[in-house]
Image (spheres, rainbow, N blue to C red):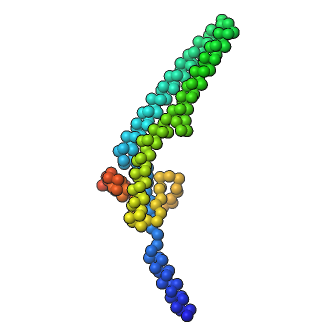
């Protein structure tokens, strides 16, 4: 009876080992760098950001000029006009800070634009990764471009080029051949 139980356990162990889970990894930074739409979206976001930053800097420069003019005339101005000019400068500064928050804040225009331009590409990559993982029975797919630290990774398990091929951006040259 013991031999039968041991034999059954051994058979189940062998069967379980033959159906072992597969692991692979991708480098999403590498994948995204090889998608032209992503690069175009990244440059567009950068251009928009630079344009908005210039606009905000110009407004702060205007406020600085108003403040310097106020400082030079301050001793000559009556109290009511001083107060009015101070309030005007403070109000303009608040408006520019609000504009800055609107453009670059947590849920600002730049964040929304990034969601509009980049998120669909990231979703496309994620869907390709999920589909490839299912088709190749890969249990876990790591992303080595993030905070995941890998001490060693065998290039034969790198599926980044397969994802690019699945997305239609195959470059025909594997990373290790470069």
**Residue found at x 54% / y 89%:** 5
Measuring from the top left, give residue 123's x and y in whole percent.
43, 50
Measuring from the top left, give residue 159's x and y in whole percent.
40, 59
In this view, the residue in front, 66 or 155, is: 66
The quadrant of the picture occupied by the N terminus is: bottom right
User: Given the current orientation, which residue lies at the most extreme right position?
Assistant: 79
Residue 74 in sight from this viewpoint:
no
From what the image shows, is residue 14 above or below residue 51? below
**Residue found at x 50% / y 22%:** 58
**Residue found at x 52% / y 56%:** 148
Measuring from the top left, give residue 42's x and y in whole percent.
42, 40
In this view, the residue in front, 174 or 130, is: 130
Measuring from the top left, give residue 32's x and y in whole percent.
40, 48
Horizontal side of 13 relative to 135 (left or right) equals: right
Horizontal side of 167 relative to 14 (left or right) equals: left
Q: Quadrant of residue 133?
A: bottom left
């Amino acid at each position: 009876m013991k031999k039968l139980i041991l034999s059954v356990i051994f058979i189940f162990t062998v069967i379980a080992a033959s159906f072992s889970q597969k692991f692979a990894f991708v480098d999403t930074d590498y994948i995204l760098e090889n998608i032209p739409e992503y690069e175009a979206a990244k440059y567009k976001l950068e251009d928009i950001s630079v344009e908005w930053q210039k606009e905000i800097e110009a407004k702060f420069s205007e406020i600085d000029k108003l403040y310097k003019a106020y400082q030079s005339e301050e001793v000559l101005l009556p109290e009511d006009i001083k107060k009015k000019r101070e309030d005007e400068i403070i109000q303009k500064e608040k408006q520019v800070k609000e504009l800055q928050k609107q453009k670059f804040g947590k849920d600002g225009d730049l964040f929304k634009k990034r969601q509009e331009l980049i998120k669909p590409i990231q979703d496309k990559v994620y869907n390709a990764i999920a589909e490839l993982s299912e088709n190749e029975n890969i249990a876990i797919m790591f992303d080595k471009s993030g905070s995941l630290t890998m001490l060693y990774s065998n290039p034969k398990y790198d599926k980044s080029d397969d994802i690019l091929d699945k997305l239609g951006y195959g470059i025909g040259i594997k990373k290790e051949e470069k």
